Amino acid sequence: MTAVYASTADTDVVVFRTRADEVYAQLKRDIAEFRMVPGDRFTENEISERLGVSRTPVRQALFRLQQEGFVEVLFRSGWRVLPFDFDQFEQLYDLRMVLETTAVHRLCETDRRINRQMLSALGTIWLVPQAQRSSDNAQVAEWDEAFHCALVAAAGNAEMTRVHRDLTDRIRIIRRLDFTMQPRIEATYDEHAKILKAIRANRGDQAAMLLRAHIETSQAEVRKITLHQVHLARHSAL
């Protein structure tokens, strides 16, 4: 069992992770970062040997990933990373739209308690001169995810934040495919900056409109994803 330090709003706490938790986290990263792609087949023994652990934590981790819809067990032939379910992604994006536009409206209500410090921190990443923008695809993908999670968290509804984080987890892989293209990085900087400025000016309708257009653009890119793009992303990750 491993001790992991995690920060909360008030203090640092120690969270104990089992070996199965560690295997679960690693396999999830492998999927999100295209080291394992939809359709890949593998066995518990292969994972055990690669990660240097016994089969028991591997099996526990895989059953957890199966419950979350990332992998499936194949009768007498190991496991497989599940193919993309685009109908499900459409539904998740619709839910994301509702949660995030509701959050930005709340952020613009002057009588509501929100986390101003969290919003200020976003400005240090997204409201910078063009020369200071990152061109690191993986870094921008992480910042993009954190941006949207922070908008919802700053609105102060813990249940909305929890649901949004779960949703973010489930669409991570396809969102990161979006950031394999440089034009999308530049567009993300421009769009995030406009959203933040509207929120700072307490223009809720404008912020929600900009955010909706931003998410719809990403959703449209998801519809264009091909297996070829996935394998190109894996090649870049290796």
Image (cartoon, rainbow, N blue to C red):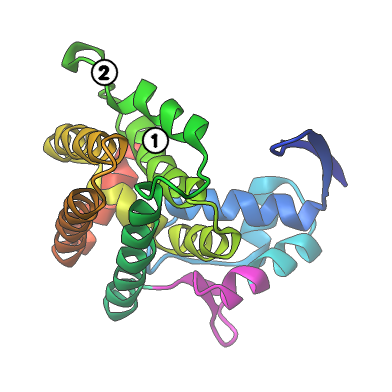
Q: Which residues are magenta?
A: 63-82
Element type where label 2 sits in the image: loop
User: Which is in the foreground here, disc 2 or disc 1?
Assistant: 2
Q: On the rendered image, what quadrant is the C terminus found in? A: top left
Element type where label 1 sits in the image: helix
Front residue of this view, candidates 159 and 183 = 159
Tell me: 47 left or right of 227. Answer: right
**Residue type at mark 2?**
Val
Give the residue drawn at x 55%, y 58%: 157
Tell me: 119 left or right of 87. Answer: right
Q: Count the marks: how many?
A: 2
State the mark number for residue 128.
Answer: 2
Give the residue drawn at x 27%, y 74%: 90
**Residue type at mark 1?**
Trp
Q: Which residue is mark 1?
A: 143
Q: Magenta includes 96?
A: no
